[in-house]
Image (cartoon, helix red, strand yellow):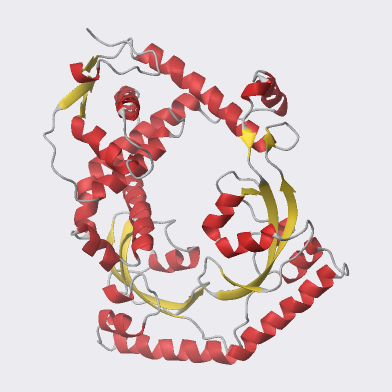
């Protein structure tokens, strides 16, 4: 059972429940305290897992125990008076819906795919997400914020027999320098002036929905008349939210700028801690001349580095437009591990063509200038630097400290959960349906006879 269990279950249940599923004859298969566990909950989780693993009795039993643990967490959360606010539930729902809207391309495509409006979708999942967030809070209370010292990590490492040490795949450390074509002041002014004419048309009574559908350059909302529903703080860039949450119902904002371009917003409705808005986005167009100039600049930087006239670190600090990496010598952090090391497969998921280039490079070498599209979806150029490459090897403290720290933390959390389940199951009413009596459970549960 992964110590991130509830987070994972939340994602699985959300995605699987979102899809139209065949109806199953439902029944209660376990009771934990006053919380029933339904057969449909197990089946829903298994449906999503089918895409990744072959479902057998072992997987079925593990899924059952994971959900049993969730119900025990929920039962104890109720005893400990742990609460989840509507704002937290709405924020979680909004975050996950935005993720799937991004995958499908637009809110319209999302609603077509699932056959229901987003508002209906949220209503159906409200209670499930609330319970799962409560269980998640309870689990965090059990495991706490564990921070292990290097000596504790080494002690953990020394307990692992050499033959049992994990094999670490080949890993790379890479950095990049990103140069974005500048937008000249004249083009910025033209864009703002054009956007202001649309804003005035809305003020004078024209439909903002129609104008957004015709002119907005935001692919996520243009087809929906520029509308975003149930926007919570933290979902959009700060500049957007600072404007949206200051408006009154029906009010239209001044034009403002974000990394995506220029916007103006109309507040449709305020609903507690969330807002419904329409917005019209226009981005200044970059000229082909400016695009070529930025490429020539990066060509020159690449040449300086290749001829050892400037270090990659210095060049990144001086020339890179990527604020997240330039202060770190251009090194790109792997979000999955929070380190600068990447396995080949992880890099392949982001840019397969880059993997082919890196495979032929020597340490310290820099790629030619290549096209790049960042998180702001704007065209840019970059060069990529290969800092280090490791061969497959058994884990060791020198090269794999971050991985060993994660393993040691997981081990500590698992022990805390093991002890907690053993203790709390003794004082909680737990009844299991006979069809799951044959499951070999991982943890020491006390089942009520």
Residue most extreme to the left: 25
Question: Which quadrant holds the C terminus?
Answer: top left
Comparing 78 with 41, the one in front is 41
Does the image show residue 433? Answer: no
Residue displayed at 42% across by 17% down: 420
Residue displayed at 30% across by 42% down: 13
Comparing 216 with 443, the one in front is 443
Residue 325 spot, x, y in % from top left: 67, 59
Q: 302 above or below 119?
A: below
Side of 28 where 384 appears, left or right:
right
Residue 105 spot, x, y in % from top left: 35, 67
Side of 188 where 326 appears, left or right:
right
Residue 283 spot, x, y in % from top left: 48, 81
Side of 128 where 299 appears, left or right:
right
Residue most extreme to the top: 449
Residue 35 spot, x, y in % from top left: 22, 25
Does the image show residue 192? Answer: yes
Q: Quadrant of residue 251?
A: bottom left
Figure label count: 0
Q: 419 above or below 208?
A: above
Comparing 140 with 63, the one in front is 63
Residue displayed at 67% across by 40% down: 392
Question: Which quadrant holds the N terminus?
Answer: top left
């Amino acid at each position: 059972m992964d110590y991130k269990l509830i987070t994972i279950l939340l994602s699985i249940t959300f995605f699987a429940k979102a899809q139209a599923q065949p109806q199953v004859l439902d029944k209660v298969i376990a009771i934990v305290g006053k919380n029933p566990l339904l057969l449909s909950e197990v089946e829903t989780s298994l449906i999503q897992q089918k895409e990744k693993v072959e479902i057998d009795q072992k997987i079925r039993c593990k899924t059952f125990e994971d959900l049993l643990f969730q119900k025990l967490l929920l039962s104890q959360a109720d005893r400990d008076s742990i609460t989840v606010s509507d704002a937290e539930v709405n924020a979680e729902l909004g975050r996950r819906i935005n993720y799937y809207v991004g995958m499908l391309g637009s809110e319209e495509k999302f609603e077509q795919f699932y056959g229901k409006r987003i508002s209906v979708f949220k209503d159906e999942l409200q209670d499930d997400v609330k319970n799962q967030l409560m269980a998640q809070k309870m689990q965090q209370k059990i495991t706490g914020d564990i921070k292990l010292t290097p000596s504790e990590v080494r002690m953990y490492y020394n307990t692992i027999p050499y033959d049992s040490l994990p094999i670490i795949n080949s890993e790379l450390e890479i950095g990049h320098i990103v140069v974005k074509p500048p937008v000249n002041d004249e083009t910025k002014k033209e864009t703002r002036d054009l956007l202001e004419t649309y804003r005035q048309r809305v003020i004078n009574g024209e439909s903002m929905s129609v104008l957004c559908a015709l002119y907005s350059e935001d692919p996520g909302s243009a087809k929906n008349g520029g509308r975003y529903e149930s926007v919570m703080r933290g979902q959009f860039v700060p500049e957007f939210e600072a404007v949206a949450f200051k408006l009154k119902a029906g009010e239209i904002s001044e034009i403002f700028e974000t990394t995506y371009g220029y916007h103006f917003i109309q507040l449709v409705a305020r609903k507690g801690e969330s807002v419904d808005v329409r917005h019209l986005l226009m981005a200044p167009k970059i000229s082909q001349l400016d695009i070529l100039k930025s490429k020539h600049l990066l060509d020159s930087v690449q040449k300086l580095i290749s001829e050892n006239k400037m270090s990659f670190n210095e060049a990144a600090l001086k020339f890179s437009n990527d604020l997240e990496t330039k202060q770190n010598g251009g090194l790109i952090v792997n979000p999955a591990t929070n380190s600068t090391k990447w396995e080949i497969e992880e890099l392949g998921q982001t840019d397969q063509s880059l993997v082919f280039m890196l495979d032929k490079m020597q340490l310290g070498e820099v790629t030619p200038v290549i096209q790049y599209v960042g998180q702001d979806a704007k065209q840019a150029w970059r060069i990529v630097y290969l800092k280090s490459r490791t061969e497959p090897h058994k884990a060791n403290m020198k090269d794999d400290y971050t991985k060993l720290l994660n393993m040691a933390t997981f081990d500590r959390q698992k022990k805390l959960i093991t002890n907690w389940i053993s203790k709390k199951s003794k004082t909680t009413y737990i009844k299991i349906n006979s069809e799951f009596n044959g499951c070999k459970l991982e943890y020491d549960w006390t089942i009520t006879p």
